[in-house]
């Protein structure tokens, strides 16, 4: 394939119950609405990418995730976030089409899935083993363009409270990235907002949540009354990335963007 198309969902924060709310949003109907929007507008991708916080500290939520995404006839590339329970996640999503961690080759691209979670902490850190696995994944496929994915943000988001719970060893991570000229992009979740920048020729991308968003550039924790969203990525044969954040204008109840804002 000359172009690899990904649909990026992140931070759905599912519960075992079907109507439970997180910051005023019913997370399961919100994910359902986001998926329905993507299927109307941007389907089919070559794979789905989901960068953590699949559940909100409730492993019973994985059953909903498996039900919603397991029958789409697409690979579902996953990694854990700080609200996930990695052992339960691997147990509940232990079969195709789900892939948790590791490296996946699609077309001319290698997608690297990292676990940046620290048990019991909202912040993140890549273990020595994870850094070694990243090094190997990049070094073993120098002919492939690489997209590196994790949950926690490896660069500051200009938000004091949020930057306290980012990737603690971002310097070590970026040192590995800098040693490999095949890295074209880094994608993460966790921050519940959009981010798009360039660092040494590498595209840096954060995607809003499929539920509630955080107010950008806020000193203290604050919610941004913007709707759920997802990101489309077109990974091109020349290593360039074409991407768009798609805001979901209507929720499960048929409301408009303003209805999300009032939630």
Image: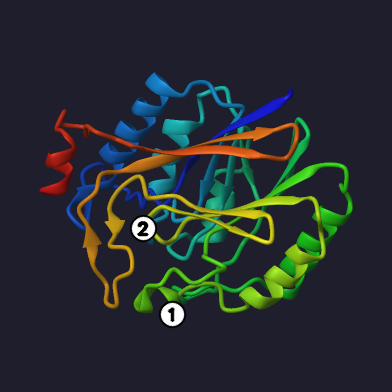
259 or 117: nearer the viewer: 259
Q: Residue at x 38, y 19 (%)?
A: 40
Local secondary structure at mark 1: loop
Q: Is residue 250 left or right of residue 54?
A: left
Report which residue position mark 2 lands on. Answer: 56
Q: Splitting the image into 4 quarters, where does residue 178 fall? A: bottom right
Vertical comparison of 105 with 224: above or below: above
The local crowd at label 1, few if under 14, some if 14 to 19, many if 20 or more residues have their Cα within 10 Å, is: few
Element at label 2: loop
* CA separation in Å, label 2 and label 1: 20 Å
Q: What percent of the width, then of the height, locates residue 127?
A: 69, 73
Residue 52, placed above or below residue 96: below
Task: Nearest to the eye among marks 2 and 1: give it.
Answer: 1
Pinpoint residue 38: horizontal percent, then vertical percent.
41, 28
Q: Residue at x 68, y 55 (%)?
A: 201
Image quarter where the N terminus lies is top right
Q: What's the image's color scheme?
A: rainbow
| Residue 104 to residue 175: above or below | above
Q: Nearer the viewer, residue 111 or 232?
A: 232
Q: Position of residue 56 (x, y in %)?
A: 36, 58
Query: According to the image, label 1 marks what residue?
Result: 164
In percent of width and height, residue 150 lies at 58, 58
Who comes first in sequence, dot 2 or dot 1?
Answer: 2
């Amino acid at each position: 394939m000359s172009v690899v198309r990904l649909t990026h969902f992140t931070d759905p924060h599912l519960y075992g119950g079907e109507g439970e709310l997180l910051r005023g949003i019913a997370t399961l109907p919100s994910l359902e609405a986001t998926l329905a929007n993507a299927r109307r507008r941007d389907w089919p991708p070559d794979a789905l990418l989901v960068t953590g916080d699949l559940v909100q500290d409730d492993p019973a939520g994985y059953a909903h995730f498996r039900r919603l995404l397991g029958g789409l006839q697409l690979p579902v590339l996953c990694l854990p976030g700080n609200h996930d329970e990695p052992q339960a996640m691997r147990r509940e999503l232990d079969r195709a089409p789900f892939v948790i961690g590791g490296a996946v080759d699609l077309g001319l691209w290698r997608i690297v899935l990292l676990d940046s979670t620290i048990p019991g902490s909202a912040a993140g850190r890549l273990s020595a083993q994870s850094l070694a696995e990243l090094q190997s994944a990049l070094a073993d496929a120098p002919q492939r363009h690489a997209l590196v994915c994790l949950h926690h943000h490896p660069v500051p988001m200009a938000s004091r409270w949020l930057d306290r719970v980012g990737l603690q060893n971002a310097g070590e991570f970026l040192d590995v990235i800098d040693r490999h000229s095949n890295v074209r992009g880094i994608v993460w979740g966790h921050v519940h907002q959009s981010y798009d920048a360039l660092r040494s020729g590498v595209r840096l991308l954060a995607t809003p949540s499929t539920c509630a968003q955080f107010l950008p550039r806020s000193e203290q924790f604050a919610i941004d009354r913007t709707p759920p969203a997802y990101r489309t990525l077109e990974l091109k044969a020349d290593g360039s990335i074409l991407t768009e954040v798609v805001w979901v204008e209507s929720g499960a109840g048929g409301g408009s963007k303003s209805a999300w804002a009032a939630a």
